[in-house]
Every structure is written in C-alpha cells, then in structure tokens.
Amino acid sequence: MIRESSKSILVEELKAQAKSLGFSRVGIAAVSPSTHIDFYQSWIDAGMQGEMRYLAREESVKRRGDVEQTLPGARSVIVVTHDYLTEDLGCSPDDPTMAIVARYARGDDYHDIIKSKLLGLLKWLSQRVPERVEGRAYVDTGPILERDLAQRAGLGWFGKNTMLINPTTGSFFFLGLLLIDLELSADSPFLEDRCGTCRSCLDACPTGALLGRDAKGAPVMDARRCISYLTIELRSAIPVEFRSAIGNRIYGCDICQEVCPWNERFAEATGAPAYRASQDLDGPSLIDLAEILLSTDELGFRKTFKKSAIRRAKRSGLLRNICIALGNWGAPAAVTTLLRALSDMEPLVRGHAAWALGQIGSSSARSALSEKLTSEEDAWVRTEISAAIEAQDSSSL
Ligand code: B12
Ligand code: SF4
Ligand code: SF4
C-alpha cells in the first residue's frame, strides 16, 4: 500500500520520466466503466463504423466499456500524448500532380515507436516501486476507448471533428495508454467544451462525414463518409459519390484538423525525428508513386514500406487511391500510367483505373477502355469500364 504523499511524489516522478521518454503530456485516469459506452453502442447500431467490423464485435464492445475486462485488477490508466507534426512538405493539396499522405503516416510507424516507449515506462515503474506491477500497453491496437480515457485523464476535450484537442497544443498527437494494476492519484477530467460556436471543421469536411454534436453533446462522425476510412480502412471499391471529393489525398485526411483554430493557433512542428517524412512519402508525385507500386507485388510493397503505417492500405488499396487521384487530376499526362493500372493483377486497381480514364476523356483513354471491355473477365471491372465510357460520351456531347 502506498501512502497518499508518496503516491503524489511517485506520480510526479512518473510524469517526468514519461516526458524524458519524449511524451509531450501525461495524465492519469482512474479505472471505472465508461459513461459513454451507450453512445458507442448506438453509433455501432447505426452502422457508422462501416466495414471496420472489429469495432462492432460484442466481446470487444464489452471490453471498451470497462478496461478491467482487458486487465483484471487494473487500477489506473496512464495516458500519454506523442506529437507527430513535423516540417511541412513541399507538396500541397492544390497541386493535383502530387500525392497527399496524412501527416501522421509520413514517417515511421507510430505503433512501434510509442509501444516501446510505454514498455520502457512500465519497466521504470516496476523498478521504482517495491510491488510487482502488471501492465499492458496500447496504441490504437486494442479494444479501448482511447480518447475517452484521455479526456478522463485531463488531456483535452472532444472537438466537433471528434478529435481529442488539447488547449495548449491542438490535436496533432497520438495517444498511448498503459493499463496498470497499481493505484495512482488520478487527474481531473477535462470537462469544458472549447469549440464554442465554431463549426469550421463541419463546413470544411469535403464528404459531409461530420454530423455535429448530438442532443447530449457527443460529436458524431459517419465514418463511412470519412476520407480516412475510405482510403485506409475500406478494402473494397470506393463509392463513386466520394471519389471526386477525395482529390489527391491518397492516404488519410487532415482537413478537419488543419482548419481547426486550436491547431492554426498552437500546433508546432515538434514531432519526433522518426515522424519526419520518409524518402518515398516526401511529397511524392502521383505518377512516380503509381509506377513504383505497379512494378511490385504485395510482398515488395510491404518491404518498401516496412517502417511505415501506410502498409495498412495494402498495395491494391493504395493503388486504388492513387488511380482516383490521377482521375481527379484529369490530365492526359496520366494516361500511360493509368493504362498500366488497367492491366494490373488486382481487379480493384483495374476498376479504379477505368474510372480515372473516364475522367480524363482523351481519345487514347477512350480507345483503351473500349478495347479492354472485350477482354476483361471481372464483372465489376466491366461495369466500371462501361460507366467510364458512358461518362466520356456524355462529357463530349
Ligand atoms: C476507428 C478509428 C478511426 C475511424 C473512425 C474515427 C472516429 N471519429 O470514430 C477512422 C478510420 C475514420 C479514423 C480516422 C482518423 N483517426 Co482514428 N482511430 C480510430 C480508433 C481505432 C477507434 C475510435 C473509435 O472508437 N471511434 C468510435 C467513436 C464513437 O468513438 P470516439 O471517437 O472515441 O468517440 C467518443 C465520444 O463520442 C465520446 N462521447 C460519447 N458521448 C459523449 C457525450 C459528450 C458530451 C462528449 C463530449 C463526448 C461523448 O465517447 C465516444 C466513445 O469514446 C482510435 C483508437 C482507439 N482505440 O480509440 C483511433 C484514433 C481516434 N485515431 C486517431 C487519428 C490520428 C486519426 C486520423 C487523424 C488519421 C488521419 N489523419 O487520417 C483520422 C481523424 C479523423 C477524425 N476526425 O476522427 C487518433 C486520434 C488522436 C486524437 N488527438 O484524437 C486515435 C486515438 C489513435 C491513437 N492512438 O492516436 N480513425
Ligand atoms: S478526416 Fe477528412 S473526411 Fe474525415 S471527417 Fe475529417 S475532414 Fe472529413
Ligand atoms: S474546427 Fe472548431 S468546431 Fe471543429 S473541432 Fe476545431 S474548434 Fe471545434
């Protein structure tokens, strides 16, 4: 049993240790069932998680509601933030020839970086106190309501963009959690809503994914409409209604964070050097990136991006997204690459290449589509080719 005064000294030392490991902020939440699990369940019941089935499994919802289901005997949750904003790249969303990768995914994979730091913190704690400390580290990897616990640990509020926002630094940070069976003095929850009357994120979201706050004040997102979901989590075809709105965002989306006044005012490039953009993701041209991916298979893709979170989209998903961006660029200079994509081994890539060629509307694109229609065996790809030809015919009327 640790006395109150020794407990607060321990917490101070723990926070200093976490900061020396590179975490920008640290908070402690007491263990108790979440008061937001009913909202979570209704969000699932409305189907807003789309194809992210892992969010809906009954057992995992139960675990989300109460961290003791994950670590029996858990007494505290140490919540840390790790900033990821680094110097901006030369590429811009206004240059349609360039690929935009969400800021969080330009450097090394955050899961590995944060998890090993959290385990370092657990080791430090185990050596610091006489009793044996049982702990589990999570970074976006388990059935835990991470933002819920971060808000309870006093680290920020839920913005209308659904992000956890800190009043001194904004929202460009990851969350990491350490569940432990040691009772520490908890921080006070962050109870204010500092969004006020602002609605910049709601107005800026290109796909209408942000639905505002519900009657109880919970921010609601229909993830099925979010570009981050469409370009990363969705494994199948991207619904036609969202393709133009994706623009040149080939992996994830930062728009609702970039327009947030709390980021405009406070966000600084303080991210760890490991989060700096890797060579391949440093403002890549759409054509260059497409050619790299078209020349390799899934195994080669995994090797090329072995240190990057971008692996999650898989080769076919990333190429699907690049085809959409090339179609949105709409220039004849993209035709040669798209013709290669039209013969790719993956139907998902061929179908989106067809859509993109339909957006370009040059005579070479038109004849390649007609020719491909006679040999394509996949029924869905044939539908995409026919729709692309139709789109070209109606735009040339
Ligand atoms: C699934 C998921 C997604 C999905 C769905 C996102 C969403 N908004 O739900 C998709 C793929 C779209 C996504 C996108 C992104 N994600 Co994500 N994602 C997750 C994940 C794995 C689960 C989130 C979840 O459970 N969503 C379901 C909703 C219902 O839960 P919630 O967001 O926690 O909502 C809570 C509030 O509504 C609250 N609530 C309920 N009632 C009430 C009432 C009141 C009054 C209030 C105030 C609140 C409240 O309770 C809910 C449950 O906790 C978490 C990691 C984790 N395990 O938590 C990362 C996480 C949320 N993602 C993260 C990041 C970085 C991103 C992106 C920025 C990546 C990118 N650039 O593309 C985008 C941001 C998009 C956005 N605006 O949210 C970070 C966010 C860090 C932060 N500062 O908030 C997390 C925490 C991962 C991490 N460990 O760092 N993500
Ligand atoms: S990440 Fe992009 S698409 Fe998703 S809610 Fe934010 S602005 Fe909308
Ligand atoms: S843009 Fe405005 S409404 Fe949206 S999260 Fe930021 S402060 Fe809140």
Image: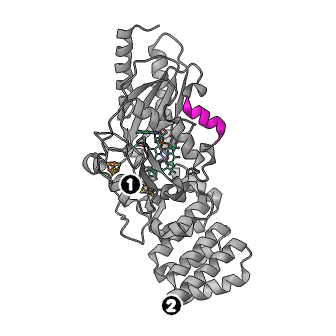
Mark 2 belongs to which amino acid? Ser
Residue 68 x/y as whole percent: 57, 24
Place residue 60 in its image quadrant: top right
> Residue 39, can we see it?
yes
The way the protein has been coloured in the rendering is one colour
Place residue 320 in its image quadrant: bottom right
Label 1 beta carbon less than 8 Å to ligand 2:
yes
Residue 22 x/y as whole percent: 38, 34
In what quadrant does ligand 2 lie?
bottom left
Q: Is 238 in the magenta?
A: no
> Which residue is located at x 40 percent, y 36 percent?
81
Up-down relation of residue 320 to residue 105 (above or below):
below
| Nearest the eye: 348 or 16 | 348
- Which mark, by number, is residue 396? 2
Up-down relation of residue 33 to residue 224 (above or below):
above
- Which mark, by number, is residue 32? none
Residues rendered magenta in the picture: 57-66
Place residue 58 in its image quadrant: top right
Residue placed farthest to the bottom in the image?
397
